Amino acid sequence: MSFSCDKCGYENNEIQSGAVIADKGVKLTLRVMSIKDLNRQVVKSDYTSVKVVELDFEIPAQSQKGEVTTIEGIIDRSVTGLEQDQIVRRISHPEDAIKIDEFIGKLKELKEVKTPFTMILEDISGNSFIENPNIPQIDKNCQIEHFKRSKDQDHQLGVFTHKEVMESEETALLKPIEEGTYPLEDFEGDVLQFQTNCTSCNAPCMTNMKLTNIPHFKEVVIMATVCDTCGHRTNEVKSGGGVEPQGLHIEVDVRNKNDFSRDVLKSETCHLKIPQLELEVGPHALGGRFTTVEGLIVAIKDQISDPKHSHMFGDSMDEKSKKQLESFLIKFEDIIEGKMMVTLVLDDPAGNSYIQSMVDDKPDDALRINHYERTYEQNEELGLNDMKTENY
């Protein structure tokens, strides 16, 4: 929403998120290195807290309305807020006013970027964003972390479990199933259904789920959702097994049409890279998928080019960035048409991803598979560092 009054000069460009609350919160850590970084666009929800590490300065969540702004705009709004009552404060509390004036000076100096500084946006709703000026390449100065919300944070967003909603005595949602009622063989052959909400329009819909065995690999769970209200479709694959002892690094050379037909299982923890395009896709961008090499490349292209799935498009996008993105999408077309050879890299710390080999009796020259020991950070992301298995 945008409002401007010609008489008093009041302006308001607040936003109200039309998206559903994300499954996880998001923490955006931006290292501001130059004045150019001050022009980065920022989408900030009501639940976003902002910190400037070097000044030990924090704007608490829900103290400001959500807005579309820039890094410089966040600093300017902070300065305006601190200056608001300075005239009265200089009379009633002169010592405090002097300290605030000194701090306002430090905030204004940030806009000159004499030295780099760090700005952190933490949004428990997961609906905040900082523009990447180097799209489609990875943003080396901005680190994105997704985190699981605490119970208090869920309550702050109005999210409650069924148990918390029920005011009366505990009532089981489903009748307990007796042992032996559903053998594993019957379960593998059935398509199960459960109710959920559409990720696009939030209308109630049904999700189909089936356990599938991939030859020469392992079992996976395939889930597909079709919304009868808006027609939105999603499909996702999750590993049916646990985390492997080692991480998995797979490289496949995509040189001809035969390579496009290779089966690919990309788990929800798998990072994807195409070195020739300097492209890196995080695990949350595409989720888990069971498809082909061609299907995976097309899915990446569609997600980059679709405004519904990307913050890259819009009226505010400058011409230089728009041309860079158009040139990047043309390269994707060249790959799909077989005019450009690339290497597809899957890096899965959980070890639950797979690319089909085209030969059975000898090594596949175009396919390279390596196992590696996970780092502490990777184990932390998978929740393994705090897992206790002794005496169980």
Image (tube, grey):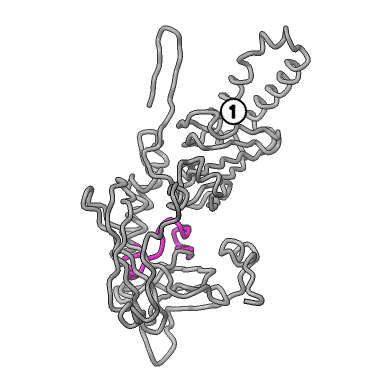
Residue 168 in percent (x, y) is at 43, 49
Residue 176 in percent (x, y) is at 39, 69
Q: Nearer the viewer, residue 52 or 152?
A: 152
Quadrant (top left/top right/bottom left/bottom right) for the N terminus: top left
Q: Quadrant of residue 316?
A: top left
Quadrant (top left/top right/bottom left/bottom right) for the C terminus: bottom right
Q: Which residue is mark 1?
A: 75
Q: Is residue 4 magenta?
A: no
Q: Is residue 289 magenta?
A: yes
Q: Quadrant of residue 92?
A: top right
Residue positioned 34% across, 50% down in the render: 199
Q: Nearer the viewer, residue 182 or 63?
A: 182
Q: Is residue 270 left or right of residue 234?
A: right
Any part of residue 47 in sight: yes
Q: Quadrant of residue 353?
A: bottom left
Residue positioned 32% across, 73% down in the render: 256
In the rendered view, tell whether residue 70 sits above or below residue 173. above
Any part of residue 280 in sight: no
Q: Which residues are magenta?
A: 270-297
Residue positioned 70% across, 35% down in the render: 56
Q: Nearer the viewer, residue 160 or 381?
A: 160
Residue 205 in percent (x, y) is at 27, 54
Residue 322 in percent (x, y) is at 38, 42
Q: Amino acid at mark 1?
A: Ile
